[in-house]
Amino acid sequence: MWKQGQSGNPSGRRLAANDDWLPGETPAERVRRRSRERAAKWRQDNPDRVADLRKQSQSKRKDRWDEFLAGERIRYLAKAEAKLAKQREERAKDPEKFRARLRNHYQRNKHEYVARVAARRAARIQATPPWVDKDEILAFYAEARRLTKLTGIPHEVDHIHPLQGKNLCGLHVPWNLQVLPRVENRKKHNRYDGGCSPLPAT
């Protein structure tokens, strides 16, 4: 029988030397094993308490994660403009290197690009009502192409209310479309800028 404070009995309890030793097991390993077994038995006997503790732990982790993300957003916004300016400078110095990097990324992740385009196409089809005038929609794309040729600045057709927005979703209809320079459209991403699109005439 071990005595209190004996090496291999860190808990200080008096443990009986019964016949539950495993082959080659040291006293310290036996203490750890028996501790795990007691913990497992307690979890089995107290499932409600285990569930409550798990919910409390998840809630604490979520709160800490939300705080971390909020801090990361603040840090990113503080450095975003300087970082973007540096990227623009590097792109202007060696545009071919930048294009090669984009091509390499596309080749390594081609399946992701294909899936993204397919999802976008499916969302557009689903968001296009059967009664909408397709010619009016095509007019926006023709105008974007005309402005691109006229100014030399790439233009794109943007959805004022995004097709796959986080808080709201729009339709692929003429009164939800606008022509924007590509840079402005990419800055907007999948957000609603707060503007109001005109309603169709009734």
Image: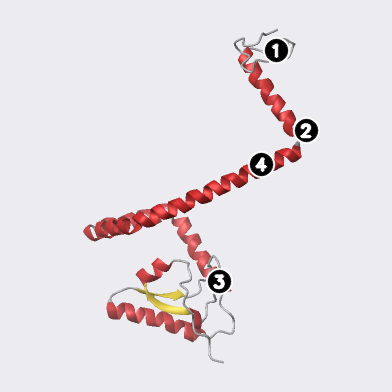
* Nearer to me, 57 or 136: 57
| Residue 180 to residue 94: above or below | below
Q: Earlier in the sequence, mark 4 or mark 3?
A: 4
Residue named by callout 1: 14
Residue named by callout 4: 54
84 sits left or right of 122 in the view: left
Q: Residue at x 43, y 84 (%)?
A: 139
Q: Are marks 2 and 3 in contact (CB under 8 Å)?
A: no
Farthest residue, direction right: 45
**Amino acid tagged 1:** Arg
Quote the CA–CA distance across marks 1 and 4: 32 Å
Q: Earlier in the sequence, mark 2 or mark 1?
A: 1
Disc nearest the viewer among 1 and 4 = 1
193 sits left or right of 150 in the view: right
User: Which quadrant holds residue 79?
Assistant: bottom left
**Amino acid tagged 3:** Cys
Q: Position of residue 77 (x, y in %)?
A: 38, 57
Specify the label residue 26 is tagged with: none
* Nearer to me, 66 or 136: 66
Q: Image quadrant for the C terminus?
A: bottom right
Q: Are marks 2 and 4 in contact (CB under 8 Å)?
A: no
Residue named by callout 2: 45
Residue named by callout 3: 169
Q: Earlier in the sequence, mark 2 or mark 4?
A: 2
